[in-house]
Image (spheres, rainbow, N blue to C red):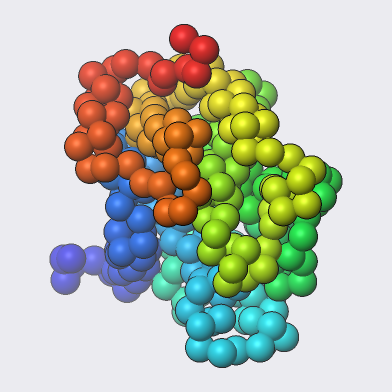
Amino acid sequence: MSDSLDGGSLYDRCAQEAAATVISAYSTSFALACRLLGPRVRTHVRSIYALVRIADEVVDGAADQTGLPAATQRLLLDELEAETLSAVARGFSTNLIVHAFALAARECGIGHDLVRPFFASMRTDLTRTQHDDASHDEYVYGSAEVVGLMCLQVFVNAGRSSPIEPDPTLVEGARRLGAAFQDVNFLRDRNDDESRLGRDYLGLQDGRHDRTAILDRIDADLDAAAVAIADLPTDCRRAVTTAHGLFAELARRLRDDDETARVSVPAPVKATIAARALAGRPPKRSNV
């Protein structure tokens, strides 16, 4: 970091580096995909996911593990949402992660219409443990699809003097990819969700759905997203293709697992998936 940076630039850089630290600590797979993003978009995408990670810690992780009651977790989440919306409006926050997110949001056109549904889904985790189809879809939209849409805003608008609306095909692809990611995570984390948190996002406990049907839906979402990836800006495609490949591999392994352990992708397989993306190979589709 250069001492020649002015105060604003120095603070911005510190905030963005703090966001990068959060991501590298929490997710090796996502950190890998981020490294494949072009520099135009990489910093802003890290900033989005850092805020998402912090909000998730309020309802599922550190805040809960310290013994804070649900009412206090709700208050913390409400305060984080309010600070995020204010920072997007004014361009500054004393919270480094929020500040980094606001920089991305202001440049790339990430508005209240995407921020508010995300926090609404986070609040749902404090009040609802059993989901029907409608509440599942609403939760997935807010917790995952809008995150994909935030990233799409960055992919399309980073570096522009003013943001534009993404193509509808890209919007549909971002939503379907986000939904697939979330449902894969629900299946991976099912044992912990049920035993520790008492949650059933997928309707598996009451027999409304079975794993095969859910995995078929995941494959359909991944296939739809694969078509849209080809239309992304070139400096985003390798990273998104890698993320797609990692979750497609998780979905494949979930079909074969015995449900007793959390499925993961071994490091050599991750490297192969990334290498395919670096070589410009398109995402694999389940029916090809």
In the displayed structure, would residue 244 be above or below residue 85?
above
User: Residue 138 appears at what percent x and percent y?
Assistant: 77, 49
Quarter-of-image position of residue 170? top right
Q: Is residue 42 above or below residue 61?
A: above
Where 82 sits versus 122, above or below?
Answer: below
Q: Residue furthest top?
A: 288
Q: Nearer the viewer, residue 209 or 201?
A: 209
* Picture coordinates of residue 15, whole percent (x, y): 37, 67
Of residue 171 and residue 272, the one placed in the foreground of this image is 272
Kindly identify the residue that appears in the image at 18 percent across and 65 percent down: 1
- Where is residue 212? Give x, y as percent: 62, 32
Residue 141: % across, % down: 69, 46
Q: Nearer the viewer, residue 98 or 177?
A: 177
Dividing the picture into quadrants, the one containing residue 129 is bottom right
Residue sitting at x 42%, y 18%: 284
Q: Find residue 8 and report its image quarter.
A: bottom left
Q: Is residue 185 left or right of residue 73?
A: left
Say above or below: 242 vs 82.
Answer: above
**Is 95 on the left-hand or right-hand side of 224?**
left
Residue 86 seen in the current view: no
Which residue occupies the foreground of this view, 144 or 256? Answer: 256
- Using the rendered image of the protein, determine whether residue 190 is visible from the camera's viewpoint: yes
Number of marks in the rendered image: 0
For image coordinates 64% across by 75% down, the residue present is: 77
- In the shown orientation, is residue 156 left or right of residue 34? right
* Residue at the spot 59% in from the left edge and 68% down from the top edge: 195
